Structures are given as C-alpha cells and as structure tokens.
Amino acid sequence: MDLPCHPWMAMVILPLLLLLVPLTAAQLWPSCGESGDYKSNSTYEANLKLLSTNLPKKAASSTNLFATDTVGNVPNVIFALALCRGDSNASACEGCLVTAFQDGQVHCANYKDAAVYYDSDPCMLRFSNKNFLATTVNERMLVIVSIESLMVNISTRADSFRLMLFTLLNSTAQSAANSSRRFTTSRLDVSVSSLPTLYCLMQCTPDLTADECTACLQPYLQYTLKYMDGKKGGRVLGTRCSMRYEIFPFFQEDPMLRIINLAPEVPPINSTMPLITVNPPPQPQSQSPVAAALHGRNSRRRALWIIAAAAPLLSIFLCAILFVVWIRRRRKGTEILHDQAAANRPEEDELVWRLEEKSSEFTLFDLSEILHATHDFSKENLLGQGGFGPVYKWIGTLKEIEVMQ
C-alpha cells in the first residue's frame, strides 16, 4: 500500500519513537533487595523523595563525588549511598544520580532496598531501610561479563591472557587502595603473543581505609578469573567497590597507572567464593543454580517492565497508522464521487434539453425567469397547493406554475 509521508504523520510518529529511546539508551543493572516494600503515598515514599532531591546535590558538591545520608525515623528510616566515578565531573554526577533514583523506583518498584548500576553512566546508588552504612561489607554484588570472547583457544595464549589479566587487576587494586580517592585507571603496557592491550578502572568508596579497600577488591580478582577468562571485557560491581576492564580505553583522560611488568604467576581460583549474580551468565557448567535463579528473577522483572512500557506505545502507533489509512481512503472515495458527479452533470443537462425539444408540453425555465414572473414567489401570486407544492400565478403570458419541493 502506497502511503506517502505527510508532515503531520511525522509529528505523530516521531514522539512515539522518542519515547522508546530511553528503553535502549543506557544499560542498567538494578538489584532489588528483600527487606520489605512500601506503599504509595506513604511516609517511606515521602522520605525517599526528599532523599532523591538532596543526595545527588550533596554527592556532586563533594570533592570525591561521594555522599551518604539518612532520612526519617524507624520504621520509615532510609539509609543511602551515592558514588560517582573518579573521572566524572559534578554536573554529570548529579544528573546520573537523579536518574538513578528514578530508575531504582521504576525497576524496583516499592522495594525498600535497591541498588542501581550503569553500563556507561558514571554513578551507582543504593538506598535501604537497613543500616548498611554502619558496615564495610560489599553487598549487592553483580558480575557483568562481555558476550564477546578473544581468540585464545591455544593453551599458551590462554595462559598468557590469564597472566595479563591477573597482573592488570592486582596492580590496579593496589594502586586504588593506596590513593587518597580510592580510585585508579590503568593500562597494561605489555605485549604478549599479539594479545590486545588491556585497560582497567577500580574504585572504592572514599570512606574506606586502604586496608578495607584492598579487602573489598581482593575477591574481584578471583571472580574475574572465574567468570571472565578469555572475555574481551567485564566488570564486578558492589556497594563498596567496583572494577571494570576492557580491550579499549573507556575512561576519561590518560590512564593514571601504566603497568610494564607481568606478575610471576596466577594464583589458583578459590572454589569457596560466595555466590553472586552474573549478567549475562557464563556457560551452564560454571554457573551455580542459586546465581542462575537470582539472575533469572531480575531478567524477568526487566523484561516485564520493558513490555509494559512498550505495549501502550506500540498500540498508539498502530492506531495512528490505521487512522491515516482510513482518512486517506475516505478522502479518496469522496474525490471519486465528486469526479463522477461532475462528469455526469453535462450528460444530465443535455438529456433535459433533448426532452424539451421533443415535447411541446415540456418547457424548461431559468430560475431568474421564475423569480421575475412570480415576484419572488410573493403571497399575492400564490393560487393554492398542488400535488408537488404551492402553485403561483405567472405575471406576463398567462401561465400557472407548480413549485416542486
């Protein structure tokens, strides 16, 4: 069906497409807790709204782009932590945290405990009715694994990549823990077996001591070697510390640390590490049933949210298309009828004139003649009522006319 695009059609369709952009613009990983939920228009929701107004500004105004806050009283008390990446700026930090509060309440609707992590946006957020600020335990952990693998199937190359990856993470973790902001970006300037250059970023919350930051990041080396071996990139995210590595530079400015020497060896993987959520999951043989269940629950929630948001928009879009088709068909049908009427009018006039020529009893008058002869159908010339309407006297040659109504 040929449907040329009119400007008003673009005005209808473009806003619908723009509404769909936020669904795919920024990848985020929400982590919803299990410490209860709150009702709409409750005191807890009011406290959360107050927190969402104050905490982003507080973090953005901090030199470390970090802030914690507590709002309300038991049982409606809320504890919150906000941290922006060390290579971010105040404006980007505040905007990201404002969005994080919104995303947290959408993806973890009415949950009292939620954490929000982003792919490219430079912040993380957690709020809870439990006082997690009183401890340095790294909760709400997620492992994010790249779906792309490096070509390291040959045993020697695979071993070389593991050694490179461990060296990168170990050196960066030490540097981040010993920095005043608990933040470091790095690059591994060692070329091994034509493998790509590796880049890394590690960060702890600035309120941790150097030892606490080291303890937080130490398990990340094990998680990375277990879940990301041979992958082009990945990250481990938590409330208290985070790590990301890639085969391309993904942070602002030059790396703060350049690593030029490889570690002597890679330590064995600890088989007793606690279970964490993996997204996307590794191969089935390396993923535990508990981690798979946790990941599946979050994936289903995300999928349901996307369907709920997209379905009304798609319905409106389809209705707009059907309306356009109906309007065009209706307009086209009207034009055809008008064209047919215009084409038939000369034939009808010609038929009337031929009838007048053939019959002396049939006479055709112009309207102007009738108006003149009846004095504009005046009551004085009205003779009576005929079968088709009132009968008027003709002024001039004596005639009577019957006006058909």
Image (cartoon, rainbow, N blue to C red):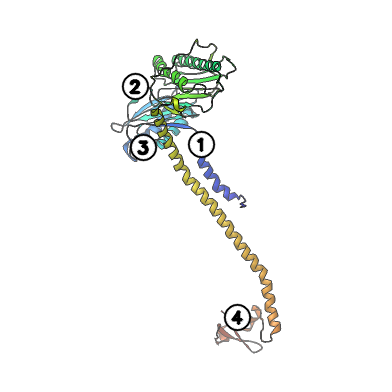
Give the residue at x 42% y 18%. 219
Q: What residue type is labelled 4?
A: Asp
Mark 4 Cα-neighbour bin, 10 Å: few <14, some 14–19, many ≥20: few
Residues marked 2 and 4 touching at CB (< 8 Å): no
Q: Using the image, tell me which numbered label, if any, was put on residue 135.
A: 2
- Residue 49 place in picture, x, y as percent: 38, 35
Q: Which amino acid does label 3 sit on?
A: Asn
- Which of these two is toward me, 268 or 167? 268
Q: Using the image, tell me which numbered label, if any, was put on residue 24.
A: 1
Task: Please identify the quarter of the rendering in which residue 194 is found.
Answer: top right
Whether residue 181 appears in this view of the structure is no
> Which residue in the protein does label 3 denote?
110
Say whether residue 60 is left or right of residue 192.
Answer: left
- Residue 267 place in picture, x, y as percent: 45, 13
User: Whole-Å distance between the Cαs marked 4 and 1?
Assistant: 74 Å
Q: Is residue 180 above or below residue 24?
A: above
Dot 1 falls on a residue whose secondary structure is: helix
> Which residue in the protein does label 4 denote?
376
Say whether residue 123 is left or right of residue 362.
Answer: left
- Residue 130 place in picture, x, y as percent: 32, 28
Give the residue at x 36% y 27%. 69
The mark lying in front, picked from 1 and 2, is 1
